């Protein structure tokens, strides 16, 4: 294994191995040498953007990760915006290549949906083997110049349209169980985001392929043990029901704080930590900076509180079904349906957990520990449902991780394609959209409805 490259003195350090890309050309070829250097820069930048976001990544840091100077990076990219454009275009082509492979795969629409996951995992395997550079999560597009953002978002939207046509074909082949194909397509994007996150955690391609086996088993067969005959999930009605108490100052302050945290969660999801300013949050709400700073001290603390609130909402939903008389499978359906609905309807935005990476280590560990506990609670429901015969036996460790990921409607591809999850309201009723989003997860694509 190659030794980590030491960063230049005085520059923020991050241990990044130099990517080793095979060169089948002449060792004297300037074009080959230039391509290797360019791939190495894009690889290092993708890692930085994934961990720190666009706004908090400096060209000096990318250069230091490769043992270079900022001037060396500037020879290839005149600005950070130019570098980000190249990195995010690579991420777009990563999805585009997988979609193209799926569309060319043999079999019916269901087989080609599974082929999409296999193609994407195969590309991640190439990343793990250093045949291909890492893919950046498309989370900070709104922080880029508008023209670049629109172009890349348009490319992802084109991929989404192709996936949607594939889902629509599957829907027609299987008796039209979906009201609309779009929400199910967003689930597929969310699952691809999950695979990408897993890929960033793995060093070996075999780990990604093992994850793929579990994921395709879930998508092919669904979580439910029988394909149909289920009532609609029981609503939990978790939306805020606090009435305006005009004579209760504490109640008014709570409502104002909730409004701040909701607006902050939406902006952090769209623009990242570095791309969001407290002044912008105040402007969105139509309040003065003074009124905002009365409730919020600084941006880091604000992000911490947004994450805290989001995890509170998920835990509240899990506790609500725990206290119900519903069987395990119905508890799982109800809690996922409620959390997805709250976001799809624009009622309760949930901040994506990856934002915790910008917080100090103690705060970051606290949030990640809570998220792991949430995943285990999903796993407990899966295990109980398998024991009663309501749910199919699946790999609990990975399945619970999938559920704890797709419950957030703000993955990189999803945000790039839709701008925000609230745009679901343009498709259909948010409850119907939620049902369609979760359909493939629970019923699978291999069953006739």
Image (spheres, grey):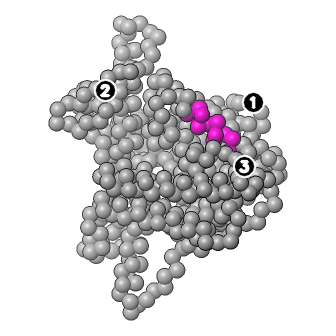
Counting every numbered tag in the picture gives 3
Task: Please identify, in this view, whether the residue under mark 3 or under mark 1 is nearer the observer.
Answer: 3
Q: CA distance from mark 3 to mark 1?
A: 28 Å
Res 4 label: 2
Res 106 label: 1
Return the disc, 3 or 2, that comes first in the chain's sequence: 2
Query: For this rendering, which residue is in front, 211 or 274?
Result: 211
Q: Residue at x 31, y 26 (%)?
A: 4
> Is residue 38 at least partly visible in the picture?
no
Query: For this rendering, which residue is in front, 238 or 52?
Result: 238
Return the disc, 2 or 1, that comes first in the chain's sequence: 2
Q: Quadrant of the N terminus?
A: top left
Question: What is the span of residues highlighted in magenta in the rendered image?
Answer: 208-218
Q: Residue at x 76, y 66 (%)?
A: 231
Return the disc, 3 or 1, that comes first in the chain's sequence: 1
Q: Is residue 213 magenta?
A: yes
Residue 13 shown left or right of residue 382 in the figure: left
Q: Residue at x 39, y 30 (%)?
A: 43
Residue 155 shown left or right of residue 19 in the figure: right
Q: Residues within 10 Å of mark 2 (few under 14, many from 20)?
A: some
Q: Estimate the x, y position of residue 225 in percent, counting from the top left.
A: 76, 52
Confirm or deny contact between disc 3 and disc 2 (CB under 8 A). Answer: no
Q: Estimate the x, y position of residue 111 in percent, counting from the top left.
A: 74, 37
């Amino acid at each position: 294994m190659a030794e980590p490259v030491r960063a230049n003195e005085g520059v923020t350090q991050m241990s990044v191995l130099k990517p080793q890309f095979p060169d089948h050309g002449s060792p004297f070829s300037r074009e080959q040498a230039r391509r290797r250097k360019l791939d190495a820069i894009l690889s290092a930048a993708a890692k930085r953007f994934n961990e720190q976001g666009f706004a908090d990544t400096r060209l000096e840091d990318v250069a230091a990760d490769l043992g270079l100077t900022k001037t060396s990076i500037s020879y290839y990219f005149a600005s950070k915006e130019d570098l980000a454009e190249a990195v995010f275009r690579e991420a777009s082509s990563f999805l585009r290549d997988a979609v193209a492979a799926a569309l060319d795969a043999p079999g019916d629409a269901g087989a080609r949906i599974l082929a999409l996951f296999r193609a994407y995992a195969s590309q991640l395997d190439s990343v793990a083997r250093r045949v291909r550079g890492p893919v950046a999560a498309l989370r900070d597009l709104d922080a880029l110049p508008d023209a670049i953002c629109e172009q890349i978002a348009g490319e992802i939207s084109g991929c989404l349209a192709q996936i949607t046509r594939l889902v629509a074909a599957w829907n027609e082949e299987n008796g039209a169980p979906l009201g609309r194909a779009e929400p199910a397509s967003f689930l597929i994007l969310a699952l691809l985001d999950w695979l990408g996150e897993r890929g960033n955690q793995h060093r070996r391609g075999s780990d990604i392929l093992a994850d793929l086996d579990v994921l395709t088993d879930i998508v092919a067969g669904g979580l439910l043990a029988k394909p149909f005959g289920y009532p609609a999930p029981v609503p939990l009605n978790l939306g805020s029901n606090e009435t305006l108490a005009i004579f209760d100052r504490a109640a008014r302050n709570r409502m104002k704080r909730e409004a701040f945290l909701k607006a902050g969660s939406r902006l952090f999801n769209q623009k990242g930590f570095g791309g969001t300013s407290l002044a912008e949050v105040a402007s969105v709400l139509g309040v003065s900076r003074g009124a905002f700073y009365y409730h919020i001290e600084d941006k880091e603390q604000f992000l911490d509180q947004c994450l805290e609130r989001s995890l509170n909402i998920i835990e509240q939903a899990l506790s609500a079904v725990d206290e119900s008389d519903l069987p395990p499978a119905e508890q799982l359906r109800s809690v996922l349906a409620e959390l997805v609905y709250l976001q799809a309807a624009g009622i309760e935005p949930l901040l994506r957990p990856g934002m915790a990476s910008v917080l100090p280590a103690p705060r970051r560990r606290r949030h990640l520990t809570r998220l792991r506990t949430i995943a285990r609670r999903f796993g407990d429901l899966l295990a109980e449902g398998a024991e009663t015969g309501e749910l199919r036996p699946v790999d609990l460790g990975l399945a619970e991780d999938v559920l704890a990921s797709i419950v957030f409607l703000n993955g990189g591809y999803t945000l790039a394609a839709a701008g925000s999850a609230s745009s679901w309201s343009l498709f259909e009723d948010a409850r119907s959209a939620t049902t369609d989003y979760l359909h493939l997860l629970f019923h699978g694509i291999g069953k006739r409805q």
